[in-house]
Amino acid sequence: MSHLTRVQLVELRAELERQLTRLKRSMKVTEEAARPVELDQTAVGRLSRMDAMQNQHLTKNLKEREEVKFALLNEALQRLESGTYGLCLQCAAEVGFDRLLVYPEAPACGQCR
Ligand SMILES: [Zn+2]
């Protein structure tokens, strides 16, 4: 059984779902940005091409971070379903409500992270 109260779990679930909705929206934007840029060869100088390549690199990093967070959020929701939410995956310690409120997808306690 979870050490969290019913009210706390409801609050944390709402937060997880809120973050997931926001992340999905943001991932869509990143997806658009990740598309290859079509450069107008006559209007765009060498510097701008380098800018575009730099931006693509940053977009790729962002996309990877978003995918990691997406997985963590979904895993946290699964743990909520199965009743193991709020327990550290490393040491099985109870993760405090305060930490979960800030970092609801946390798979580990403050000691193990
Ligand atoms: Zn731990």
Image: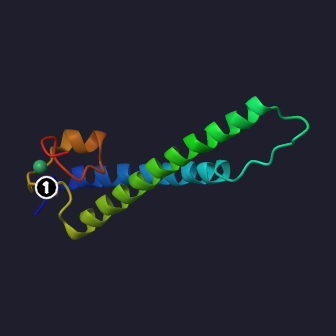
Quarter holding residue 99 = top left
* Furthest residue in direction right, as rendered: 42
Quarter of the image for the N terminus: give it.
bottom left
Residue at image location 25% in from the left, 64% down from the top: 79
Disc 1 crowd, CA 10 A, few/some/many (<14, 14-19, 20+): few
- Seen from the viewer's position, the closer of residues 66 and 6 is 66
Q: Could you tell whether 18 is left or right of 43 in the image? A: left
Residue 62: x and y in percent read 51, 45
Dot 1 falls on a residue whose secondary structure is: loop
Q: How is the image coloured?
A: rainbow
Q: Nearer the viewer, residue 103 or 66?
A: 66
Q: Give how far across and how far down residue 15 sits, in percent.
A: 36, 48
Q: Is residue 57 left or right of residue 5?
A: right
- Quadrant the C terminus occupies: top left
**Residue at image coords 49%, 54%:** 21
- Please indicate whether residue 32 sits to the left or right of residue 101 in the image: right
Q: Residue at coordinates 13% horizontally, 59% vertically from top-left?
A: 2
| Residue under label 1 | 90
Question: Where 56 falls versus 88 (above or below)?
Answer: above
* Residue 74 in sight here: yes
- On the question of residue 18 being in view, the answer is no
Is ligand 1 less than 8 Å from the beta carbon at label 1? yes
The amino acid type of the residue labelled 1 equals Gln
Q: Residue furthest front?
A: 46
